[in-house]
Image: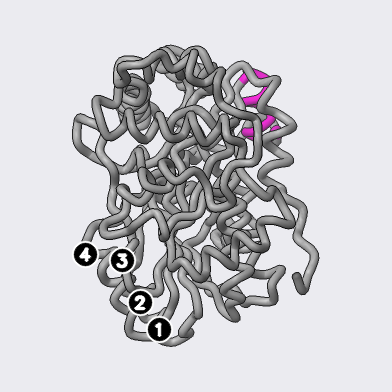
Amino acid sequence: MKAPLSEFLMEDWLESHRFSAKYNAGESGHRPQSLSGMLKGLQPDFDFELTDALTRVMLCDAPNMGLDELRHEVARLHPHATADNVLITTGTSEALLLLLRQLRPRKVAVITPAFQLLTEIPKSLGADIVPLPLEWSADGKPQAPIGVWTEVLALKKPDVLIFNHPHNPSGLVFTNEERSALLDVCDRIGCTVIGDEHYRFLASSAEEPEMGPTVWKTGSNRFVTGSFIKCAGTAGLRIGWCVGDPNTLSAMQSEKNYLTHTVNPLSQQLALWFLQSFSRQKSFFKPLYEEWSENRAALRGWLNGNTKWTGAVPQGGLVSCVFPKTHSENGTSHFAILRERGVFLLPLSTFSQTEFADVERTSGFRVGLGLPPKEFREMLTVMVRY
């Protein structure tokens, strides 16, 4: 790396408050699931005892590229991909780090505000960031100025576009036309596209959980990094993947040997069962999807019914942004007032390192929809009463 990485400001805030807040809506994932709860939820989709099978998993190094069965299941999520197009990683953060180190871009376009890793890793490699800033309406709803973005891409000609979709922290899901406009201009200028698709399992507007779209296209200069762990409340599994051309993935794994080497076989086995269950009846995931839908409805009603806050319901993913309409009491920050009442939301000011230039909007917060619905509604009541 050419420059030291900046302090991970977002993670510092999360670590400082996630264990002490009564209502922890600062997180970007679903409420944590226990191992027993996950196995019990998955069990209806299988004709053998999962708990017994898990105890027989050997605690050895897994295959370097990941378990063949797991790579096959990930490939099924990406049209015309095969297991050779899949590398299993220790979370998507590792996948992005390894991939960007292989690509070594000079200019990286990123939709902003962004997850800090998406800008800090390219900067540390000597790349310039080409921001594609969201616009915000007066009532706090995010909008994607696709026409402006395509002009910026055509003018700046970045080597890489990181397409975070559904978007964190806005919760935006882009239409097929918007996606096509961005991808078409990237094809014209020879820009590699990285689809950061961590929330793809929560990107459907249908009543039943279905996968959202992917930027993957075989035979093209496109890559995908993804996972299900935030959508399924299993962040502790630390499972991610990269989908791309086999030569690049092989080079990534060669460098991975200096880092985490292979991925925990227990985590890989659970990940395999999750993806197999998802392709069957989704017995484990459906209740989580229903909780997400319930919290979206609660947030929609709350935003429409109060005079103190504005913002938007996430179209996809587990986060969105809300903004206070009024000044805080006696100069005390909104964050301090909320924390005093047990509520933790992640300040948008923690995104200031990611080319987030809208100073007015940094007074708002990222809100996570991963709490149990009863707790989420209680939290909204607390927020509107202070």
Comes first in the chain, label 1 or label 2 = 2
The residue carrying mark 2 is: 150
Of circles 2 and 3, the one toward us is: 3
Of circles 1 and 2, the one toward us is: 1
Displayed quadrant of residue 103: bottom right
Q: Amino acid at mark 2?
A: Thr
Comes first in the chain, label 3 or label 1 = 1
Q: How far from the left and from the top, in percent, is residue 228? A: 44, 38
> In the visual, does 102 lie left or right of 258?
left
Comes first in the chain, label 1 or label 4 = 4
Q: Tell me the crowding category of disc 1: few under 14, some 14 to 19, or many 20 or more residues within 10 angstroms, Cα based.
A: some
Residue span colored magenta: 332-342
Residue at disc 3, secondary structure: loop
Q: How far from the left and from the top, in percent, is residue 368? A: 49, 33
Residue at left 75%, top 70%? Answer: 1
The residue carrying mark 1 is: 190
Comes first in the chain, label 2 or label 3 = 2
Q: Tell me the crowding category of disc 4: few under 14, some 14 to 19, or many 20 or more residues within 10 angstroms, Cα based.
A: few
Q: How far from the left and from the top, in percent, is residue 268? A: 52, 36
- Which is more toward the observer, 122 or 296? 122
The Cα–Cα distance between marks 1 and 4, rounded to whole angstroms, is: 20 Å
Q: Quadrant of the C terminus?
A: top right
